[in-house]
Image: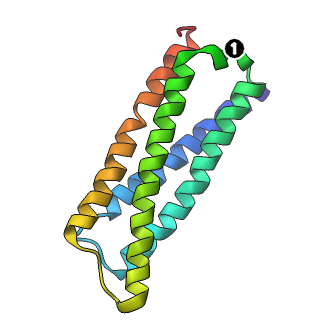
Amino acid sequence: MGEALLSFVHLSAILGWVVFASAQSALCRIDWLNVAAVRRLARLDAVSWLATAAVLLTGLARVVWGAKGTWYWHNPLLWLKLASFICAALLLAAAGRRYRRWQARLNAGGELPLAADVHAARLLVMIATHLVAVIPLAAVFMARGYG
């Protein structure tokens, strides 16, 4: 029962993480960007970090208390998953820093970001969300004993 619950919580955290990152990529468009959207992006980024922490903590819990336990530590596919996760999180963090700069500029004088900056932030989020696709591929192979 414990393994099933750990798996459920971990998968729920992953889905939350992907939803909040995808919402950022959908909202971060120059045609849609206004004061409310900038503030919403900053809030989405904050919630996304809660989901990121939940993914990491529940994933570690599965390694420590899950059915296969610490056997996973020696599996290179686990390290591929972690590296992909960390790269995606760093890309999302870079986008989040931009959102906070935009919000600070808005608060200072009401200036919206330039189109190039919006495009760059969206590109970071898009790369991160596409990188996340590597993680379940490695997970499937790990679950079947590869690595």
Above or below, comparing residue 72 to residue 114 in the picture = above
The answer to whether one can see residue 29 in this image is no
Q: Is 31 in front, or is 91?
A: 91
Q: Is 82 in front, or is 7?
A: 82
Above or below, comparing residue 22 to residue 63 in the picture = below
Tell me which residue sits at (49%, 32%) in the image: 83
Tell me which residue sits at (54%, 49%) in the image: 16
Identify residue type, mark 1. Trp
Q: Residue 75 in the image: x percent, y percent?
A: 59, 15
Side of 37 where 93 appears, left or right? right
The answer to whether one can see residue 131 in this image is yes
Q: Quadrant of residue 96?
A: bottom left
Q: Residue 77 in the image: x percent, y percent?
A: 52, 19
Looking at the image, the residue that sits furthest to the bottom is 109
Tell me which residue sits at (63%, 14%) in the image: 74
Secondary structure category for the residue under label 1:
helix
Q: Residue 109 in the image: x percent, y percent?
A: 36, 91
Above or below, comparing residue 17 to residue 65 in the picture = below
Q: Residue 125 in the image: x percent, y percent?
A: 36, 52
Tell me which residue sits at (27%, 58%) in the image: 120
Model colouring:
rainbow
Identify the residue position indicated by label 1 in the image.
71
Count of numbered badges drawn on the protein: 1
